[in-house]
Amino acid sequence: MGKLITIVGNSGVGKTTLTRALCQQAGYVTGIEEPAERPFQYQFARDLHRYALANQIDFLLFRANQERELRQFEETAVQDGGLDQDFYIFTRHFHERAYLSTAEFALCQQLHTTLRQLLPPPDLIIWLQAPLDTIATRYRQRGRPLEITQLGDLAQLEQLMMSWLPQETAIPILQIDARHADYLARAQLEALQQQIEHMITAVPTH
């Protein structure tokens, strides 16, 4: 069973960009989320209350299956976001926005708990961080054809990140300051790869 790394952070901070760059640099297996390809995204965008539950169940199941498939490789794999971020950040956000009822949120919580019990946790979380104004600028520039979370949601998403990750004790967390674009420079990626290899080597395979 291979090692699994998840890159988490606010919407637009650069999770997918770092995932692709790191996998290209280090030869890791890539696990990318393509929101526009998920079956309920467009319906959810048109009717936030009606399709929130179906959308979140689909994403949680997709991420769980992606984890399972990535673990089949001998090489280390890297995900942008992942099962836990989809629950602790986006599912909680949609509940706070009342797109999910309390009963629907509880169902998602039960599903996440069950999936995580069936799957080993990631071997490392990379937490990509930047000031909100930097994240907002990147969010505007990324130009995705479909966005569920909006510019005005970034502050709340950041609060949810802060309420989740500092409490996470079971998984090693590597914090990356992504405020400047040079964190994607080759020298920085090489140094990051070395740091990752050291950290995941110290973690026994589940």
Image (spheres, rainbow, N blue to C red):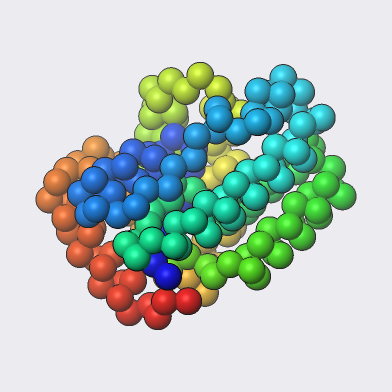
Q: Residue at x 43, y 47 (%)?
A: 31
Q: Please tell me whether residue 26 is drawn above or below residue 55 in the rendered image.
A: below
The quarter of the picture where residue 6 lies is bottom left
For residue 45, above or below residue 66: above
Q: Is residue 67 above or below residue 129?
A: below
Residue 128 visible to an observer of this rendering: no
* Place of residue 7 in the rendered image (x, y in percent of width and height, measured from the top left): 42, 52
Question: Foreground: 15 or 28?
Answer: 28
Q: Residue at x 49, y 40 (%)?
A: 33
Task: Tell me what residue is drawn at x 40 percent, y 80 percent.
Answer: 204
Q: Residue at x 39, y 67 (%)?
A: 2
Closer-to-camera residue (103/78): 78
Q: Quadrant of residue 178?
A: top left
Quadrant of image for the N terminus: bottom left
**Residue ranking furthest to the left:** 187
The quadrant where residue 115 appears? bottom right
Q: Would you say 19 lies left or right of 82 here? A: left
Q: In the shown orientation, is residue 137 left or right of residue 122?
A: left
Question: Residue 64 vs residue 33: left or right?
Answer: right
Residue 75 falls left or right of residue 82 = left
Decide if residue 113 is in sight here: yes
Q: Closest to the observer: 38 or 50?
A: 38
Q: Position of residue 110 (x, y in %)?
A: 77, 60
x, y percentage for residue 153? Answer: 59, 33
Q: How many marks?
A: 0
